[in-house]
Amino acid sequence: ALDNLEPALEEQTQADVVHSCLHSVMALPPEAEGGDGVGREPLYLDTVCALEDLLTRLLRQNMTPQGLQIMVEHLSPWIKSPRGHERARALGLGACLLEFFQEHLLVSTLVPFHNLGLLVGLFAPRCADTWTTTRQKAVGCVYSLLYLQLGYEGFSRDHRDDVAERLLTLQDGLVNADPTILFHTCHSIAQVIAKRLPSDQLISLLLTVFESLGDPDKNCSRAATVMINCLLKERGNV
């Protein structure tokens, strides 16, 4: 495995390997998931599992907020892809990385979660994606990030936060593709984020969400507008 190589791969070499591995899986046509009934699904699932294993092993080498950001940024072009099946795959991998990071989190009081706003801003607009699975994965990612922040604030792993828990309730509303319900839910998600985001993270969150105003998925660009308006209303005095 790449993570066992001694010495460790140089940063650029590692990035090139991750890029190649992601491209070989993410760019597969949707039929690779078994849609045509030819029985490729088990092979596809094995390939995705191998990719998840590679990414989490590489993340294990740098279990810091910066290490998490590096891995998530590899996914960023796929999260913003104009092709729905690629976005869905990328969100699945993102959720896997966040879950791994949360499970193995060793908080150092010297290292704040300095890039929370950037990471939340990448996932939040996808809560309105035209693909239902992507919408729900996106909320799960925001949920994980808010709990990571609580961990960095010193709360125990089994702590449950009433505000963050609202996201699980709101997730149910994302099954409905009706635009009115969808964007109302996105507004509510933004309210949760506004209540839990540290003040020093607000600017990076807004700047990242601004990038989604030109998203190829029109639902996400509209969601970005809704979320920006909500964040400015809730926290504009910061």
Image (tube, grey):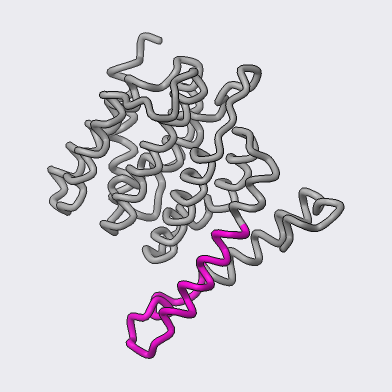
Residue 39 percent across, percent down from the top left: 39, 87
Residue at the right extreme, as displayed: 7
Give the position of the C terminus as an image quadrant.
Answer: top left
Q: Residue at x 21, y 48 (%)?
A: 174
Q: Residue at x 86, y 52 (%)?
A: 7
Q: Main secondary structure of the magenta part?
A: helix
Q: Is residue 15 left or right of residue 192?
A: right
Q: Residue at x 50, y 27 (%)?
A: 204
Residue 160 percent across, percent down from the top left: 32, 27
Residue at the top extreme, as displayed: 237
Residue at the bottom extreme, as displayed: 38
Residue 177 percent across, percent down from the top left: 17, 54
Q: Which residues are magenta?
A: 26-54
Q: Residue at x 33, y 87 (%)?
A: 37
Q: Nearer the viewer, residue 121 or 150?
A: 150
Q: Nearer the viewer, residue 148 or 157?
A: 157
Q: Work out whether residue 166 can be spotted.
A: yes
